[in-house]
Image (tube, rainbow, N blue to C red):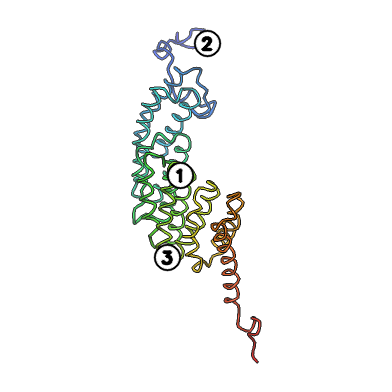
Amino acid sequence: MCERCPSKGVTPSTSAERRPREFVSSDFERDGTLLRYAPANAADAERVIERVTPRLQHANSAVVLSAVKVILEYMHAVLDPASEFCAQLRKKLAPPLVTLVTSTEPELCYVALRNVNLVVQRDRSILEGDVKVFFCKYNDPLYVKLEKLEILVRLSSEKNVDQVLLEFKEYAQEVDIEFVRRAIRAIGRCAIKLEAASQRCVNVLLELIKTKVNYIVQEAIVVVTNVFRKYPGKYEAIISTLCESLDSLDEPEAKAAMARDGAGLGEVSGESCLDARRGTACRCARRASRTSVCSDLDRREPSARVGGGPS
């Protein structure tokens, strides 16, 4: 019988046994995936990350996204996110994500954007310097544009807010009504998110109101009233500008926003509610309510109105 036969009690000697222990993928077949593996310490996590990092250059986008997920998990669960090692990792993570987003296939681009949105929620600094990549193209499908808007809002900061607002203002003047509404809401979200830039956001909204385009004006009014509630007593001076557009309001949400914030302005202002500014706000609220009632009457059949039947 052969000397290497296990029945003789001789343990086979192979080159694999003489090598030092290394990380291999089979180590985690029993536990599932790398995400379920708990590194013993920071050195162990760095060792795994170094083995996973080359997968960021893989041709398969699913492999790239999985590698990004593993690296992010280890960065925030085991390592110090503020360390120099993590700073270098962020520089390596950005290029493959940008490559996925710039895919010519809109379906693949959308999937990549959805994953990038999650990455940005976990660590915004990875793509904070690549805001321009998420600017919408004229031929992007609507679902891609809306996802890019969401990412732009999350990436907005005091450093790039002027650039982002300029893009949002341009989007708010396009022909796709749904996209225009989302762009205007994005401006309001930036105002609520960045207090230092709220005045600039309000100025952009006022410029959009002055365009006198019906659906733009109404969405902008709703957004401005949301900003009122976030910063009470700060932007009361623009109430008169909003009142100039009351006659064009025909959507319930816009009318309710004007009526609510016009009537509630006195509560926010405290003692100043007795001045002329409160009177203007209350008149705006009453006017918005009357406009709503008159619009409902105009939509009725003539025979349903009081005195509108045949004599």
Mark 3 vs mark 2, foreground winner is 3
Q: Nearer the viewer, residue 83 or 28?
A: 83
**Quadrant of the image occupied by residue 277:** bottom right
Q: Which residue is mark 2?
A: 7
Name the element at disc 2: helix
- Label 2 Cα neighbours within 10 Å, binned few <14 / some 14-19 / many ≥20: few
Q: Residue furthest bottom?
A: 311
Determine the secondary structure under disc 1: helix
Q: Is residue 112 left or right of residue 296?
A: left
What amino acid is at disc 2? Ser
Q: Position of residue 58 (x, y in %)?
A: 35, 35
- Residue annotated with mark 3: 213
Q: CA distance from mark 3 to mark 1?
A: 32 Å
As drawn, 145 above or below 299: above
- Residue depicted at 41% across the width and 45% down the height: 152
Q: Position of residue 160 (x, y in %)?
A: 37, 41
**Real-space Cα separation, disc 1 to disc 2, in angstroms:** 57 Å
- Answer few, some or many: residues within 10 Å of disc 1's Cα (few below 14, many 20 plus, some between 14 and 19): some
Front-most of 251 and 116? 251
The type of residue carrying mark 1 is Arg
Tag shown at residue 114? 1
* Viewer-side residue, 21 vs 158: 158
